[in-house]
Image: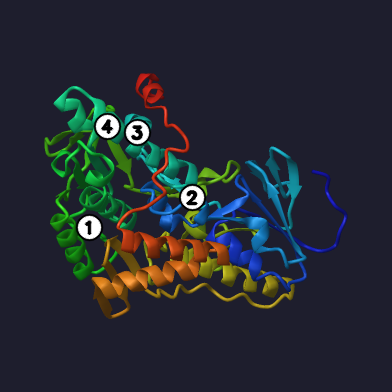
């Protein structure tokens, strides 16, 4: 791209996630030109990806055009671009649409699935970090149930109808709960000839309890609710291998399955050009208390990709949406202070609470010293997620879909709109 001759400082944001959006919004009245780059032209509401995967809501209900968010912000420009490298020396970012100059760069690229270097698991299991991956997961579930209807061998049907979720955090617990609910309420309605006892759901977690970042009350309730839904839970174990047919756990357990969903961890999506010396555990970029990247005066990082150490969080702030949103808002204020040559203010995270749903009428909520579970927590979870969705149309669509699903105990969104090619996945060699 051709460099514009202007004296107005350019704030270049890489990433249209929660943090990047809040940062851009809070620079609306600032004397800067805000530019955002993303490889998608829409914002993804990741907390509800599992509902797209399970066919509970349509995919476009959790995606919202980034340009629509900033329609009335005159100092904002969005570019659909794939970032190739950042170049601090020339203050440019190399992309597939050309080099883009910046005065201040903000890396808000979020995170991707962490397979911890296990190429076999990466090849054969299913991640769920974006809308295309959620649609792939949905297609795999529905395709394998269709195959189970016509398979002639008991062992193959058992493998096709065995679902293993790896990772007992909020994403893993919510996906597991949705699978258990599908088994209970939908399977026999939609797939005549298949029985509930044919479908098995497992949850594998490396720690000694589920929802490790939440209270022990929340963990205990989640385990009890999932167990009541006939989910088999393995705690304090790790997956050793998965070859597309057998999943092996380090306690000696072997599960025959064609469905492994990986929710066991994330890693920051660090663009090329960031020095390795400042990339920490979890592939996150070291920043100081105002989100400034170590060693640079004009580069910042926020959200999942940033490793900000504070007194309250000596291991780094958690990779959750509220952190990214609060960092984006605070960084906007600090950029304005920098332009005015005023002192910056350190970031302090305000933890407003944590929520997770386990299924119909079942959820947990930790709100400071208060802990809720069951129907009240479930209503609270739904309210917060509706409130946080981008766009009035998305809020309305999700609310109406949930309302109808609740009373129908079914969904109209279990469509195989994109065929997932399992045969190619099974025959292609595993990357080294």
* In the displayed structure image, the side of residue 116 where residue 15 appears, left or right: right
Of tags 1 and 2, the one toward the viewer is 2
Mark found first going from the N terminus, 2 or 3: 2
- Of callouts 1 and 2, the N-terminal one: 2
Helix, strand or loop under label 4? loop
Q: CA distance from mark 1 to mark 2?
A: 28 Å
Residue 303 visible (yes or no):
yes
Secondary structure beneath label 3: helix
Above/below status of 357 relative to 162:
below
Q: Is residue 415 left or right of residue 100?
A: left
Residue drawn at 42 percent across, 56 percent down = 48
Dot 4 or dot 2: first in sequence order is 2
User: Hey, which quadrant is residue 370 in on the image?
Assistant: bottom left
Q: Which mark is residue 258?
A: 4
Residue contact between numbered discs 2 and 3, judged by CB atoms under 8 Å: no
Q: Looking at this view, is 352 or 135 the one in front?
A: 135
Residue 165 coordinates in the image, percent (x, y): 27, 45
Residue drawn 34% across and 72% down? 379
Task: Please report contact status of discs 1 and 2: CB closer than 8 Å, yes or no.
Answer: no
Q: Is residue 420 above or below residue 231?
A: above
Q: Which residue is mark 3?
A: 143
Q: Earlier in the sequence, mark 4 or mark 1?
A: 1
Which percent across, then down, holds residue 371? 26, 76
Residue 283 seen: no
Q: CA distance from mark 4 to mark 2?
A: 24 Å
Find disc 1 in the rendering and name its residue. 210
């Amino acid at each position: 791209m051709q460099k514009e001759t202007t004296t107005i400082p350019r704030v270049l944001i890489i990433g249209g996630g929660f943090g990047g959006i809040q940062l851009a919004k809070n620079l609306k009245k600032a004397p800067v030109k805000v530019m955002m780059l993303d490889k998608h032209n829409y914002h993804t509401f990741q907390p509800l990806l599992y509902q797209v995967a399970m066919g509970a809501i349509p995919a476009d209900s959790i995606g919202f055009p980034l340009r629509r968010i900033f329609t009335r912000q005159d100092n904002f420009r969005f570019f659909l671009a794939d970032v190739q490298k950042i170049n601090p020396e020339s203050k440019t970012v190399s992309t597939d649409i050309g080099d883009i100059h910046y005065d201040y760069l903000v890396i808000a690229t979020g995170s991707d699935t962490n397979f911890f270097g296990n190429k076999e698991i990466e090849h054969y299991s299913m991640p769920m970090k974006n809308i295309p991956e959620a649609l792939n997961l949905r297609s795999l579930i529905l395709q394998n149930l269709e195959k189970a209807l016509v398979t002639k061998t008991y062992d193959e049907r058992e493998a096709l109808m065995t679902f293993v979720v790896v990772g007992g955090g909020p994403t893993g617990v919510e996906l597991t709960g949705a699978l258990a609910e599908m088994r209970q309420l939908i399977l026999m309605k939609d797939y005549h000839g298949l029985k509930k006892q044919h479908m098995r759901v497992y949850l594998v977690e490396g720690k000694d309890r589920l929802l490790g970042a939440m209270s022990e009350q929340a963990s205990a309730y989640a385990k009890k609710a999932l167990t009541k839904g006939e989910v088999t839970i393995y705690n304090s174990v790790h997956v050793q291998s998965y070859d597309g047919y057998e999943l092996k756990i380090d306690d000696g357990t072997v599960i025959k399955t064609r469905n492994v969903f990986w929710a066991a961890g994330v890693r920051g999506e660090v663009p090329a050009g960031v020095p390795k010396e400042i990339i920490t555990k979890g592939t996150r970029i070291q920043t100081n208390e105002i989100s400034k990247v170590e060693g640079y005066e004009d580069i910042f990082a926020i959200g999942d990709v940033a490793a900000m150490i504070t007194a309250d969080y000596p291991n780094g702030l958690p990779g959750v949406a509220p952190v990214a949103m609060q960092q984006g808002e605070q960084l906007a204020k600090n950029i304005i202070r920098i332009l005015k040559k005023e002192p910056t203010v350190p970031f302090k995270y305000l933890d407003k609470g944590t929520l997770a749903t386990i299924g119909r009428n079942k959820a947990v909520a930790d709100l400071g010293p208060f802990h809720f579970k069951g129907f009240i927590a479930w209503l609270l979870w739904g309210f917060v997620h509706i409130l946080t969705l981008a766009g009035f149309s998305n809020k309305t669509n999700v609310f109406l879909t949930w309302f109808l699903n609740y009373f129908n105990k079914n969904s109209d969104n279990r469509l195989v709109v994109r065929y997932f090619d399992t045969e190619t996945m099974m025959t292609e060699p595993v990357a080294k």
